[in-house]
Amino acid sequence: MTSLTNCSGLSVLDVDSNQLQGTLPNSIGNLSIGLQTLNITGDYIDGTITEGIGNLISLQGLYMDGNYLVGAVPASLGKLRQLNELYLSKNALSGPITATLSNLTKLTRLGLSTNAFSGAIPASLNNGPLQLLDLSEQISGGTRTRPSQSKKGGNEEAEELGRENTAAQKKKEMGCT
């Protein structure tokens, strides 16, 4: 994602179910401030959600569910005042639900299921237009087992290289350096 930080016109980044692996980089907060949608659902991303995510002030949809993210939800998410939908379900997030989410006065959908959150639900979440709050299946300990990854054969490596080349071409067409 670091290579996308020069894409100042980027408004949607959707890498849903691409089997991306690795740690969520700190540079995530350096993506375009005009970014409206960030979708990394269903990949193999681990690590913590960095405070830098709060720099993406134009986000309307943030979808990070179905990964291996750990730790607390950062307070900086409360800076995303344009956010309508926030999905962090099916990770290994833990700790209290940050009260700064009440700053999200446009938030209508909040998916936090299948994590290990503890403590009270901030009463201040009632202050906005929230229509859906999913806190089902909070797991004690917050562990989520990563499925084993098969070794890639020659054809799969060639297909992956082709996808990378296509992505690089699209990035060039969008004026990213």
Image: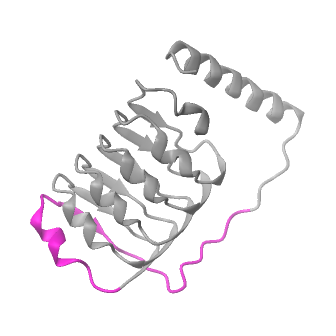
Q: How is the image coloured?
A: one colour
Residue located farthest toward the top when viewing the structure as drawn? 173
Which quadrant does the N terminus fall into?
top right
Q: Quadrant of residue 46?
A: bottom right
Q: Is residue 166 above or below residue 105?
A: above
Q: Main secondary structure of the magenta part?
A: loop
Left or right: 127 as drawn, with respect to 109: left
Which residue is drawn at the image coordinates 84% and 43% (left, top)?
A: 152
Which residue is drawn at the image coordinates 41% and 65% (left, top)?
A: 74
Part of the protein shown in magenta: 119-147
Q: Residue 176 at what x, y percent from top left?
A: 53, 21
Q: Residue 19 at what x, y percent from top left?
A: 65, 46
Pick the front one: 98 or 17: 98
Which residue is drawn at the image coordinates 89% and 33% (left, top)?
A: 154
Which quadrant does the C terminus fall into?
top right
Pick the front one: 46 or 76: 76
Q: Residue 55 at what x, y percent from top left?
A: 38, 47
Which residue is drawn at the image coordinates 23% and 50% (left, top)?
A: 81
Q: Is residue 80 above or below residue 95?
A: above
Q: Residue 92 at what x, y percent from top left?
A: 53, 71
